[in-house]
Amino acid sequence: MSKIWTIGYEQATQDEVIGTLARAGVEVLADVRALPLSRRPGFSKTALAAAAKDAGIEYRHMKALGTPAEGRAAARRHDHDALARIYAGQLELPEAIAAAAELRDLAQERRVALLCLERDAAVCHRRLLIEAVMPDFEAVDLVPDGG
């Protein structure tokens, strides 16, 4: 069975996230945020990509697999049902279908981790993504050390 790793950076430092990914043997960090920006130092796209590269991890931003604004608002309200409904619609878009196929192919060949903010993968769109397009993969949820 193929595996897919996930990690959330909430309550963690960049070093903790990158270290956890490296120790897990992750080869590709798939950033599945619609907006790869963060108020947390080190988690905006450029800084995160550079840190990943320094650790020998390839960085890929997969914008089409991110949550649209209304889905992020539902997540902030802890309305998981609304998040799931909105995100299911996102995954029906042609660009998301293409990105999901690319992600599946990549994860069958290499060790890939999905990254988003939410620490608990069970309530994040990472879990919805895996259930929708990678149900035959074993999900391994990483928790950053020290967070």
Image: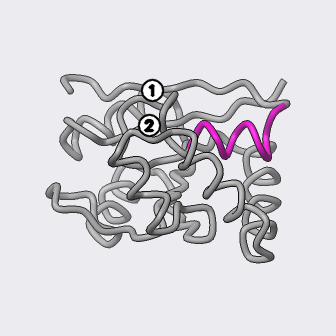
Q: Tell me residue 144's x, y (percent).
A: 31, 29
Q: What kind of residue is marked 2?
A: Ile
Q: Check contact, mark 2 vs mark 1: CB within 8 A.
A: yes
- Residue 48, by quadrant, is bottom left
Residue, far bottom: 95
Q: For the residue carrying disc 2, how many other residues have a C-alpha within 10 Å: few (<14), some (14-19), or many (20+)?
A: many
Q: What kind of residue is marked 1?
A: Leu
Q: What stretch of residues is rendered in magenta?
A: 126-135
Mark toward the start of the polypeptide (2 vs 1): 2
Against 135, residue 108 (above or below) is below
Q: Tell me residue 65's x, y (percent).
A: 62, 62
Q: Label 2 belongs to which residue?
A: 7
Q: Tell me residue 51's x, y (percent).
A: 30, 57
At horizontal 57% and vertical 40% (from top left) the residue drawn is 81
Q: Is residue 36 left or right of residue 98?
A: left
What is the number of the mark on residue 142? 1
Which quarter of the rendering shows the N terminus?
Answer: top right
At horizontal 24% and vertical 62% (from top left) the residue drawn is 38
> Is 125 colored magenta in this rendering?
no
- Residue 30, by quadrant, is bottom right
Which quarter of the rendering shows the C terminus?
Answer: top left
At horizontal 79% and vertical 47% (from top left) the residue drawn is 133
Foreground of the two, 89 or 147: 89
Secondary element at image label 2: strand
Foreground of the two, 89 or 91: 89
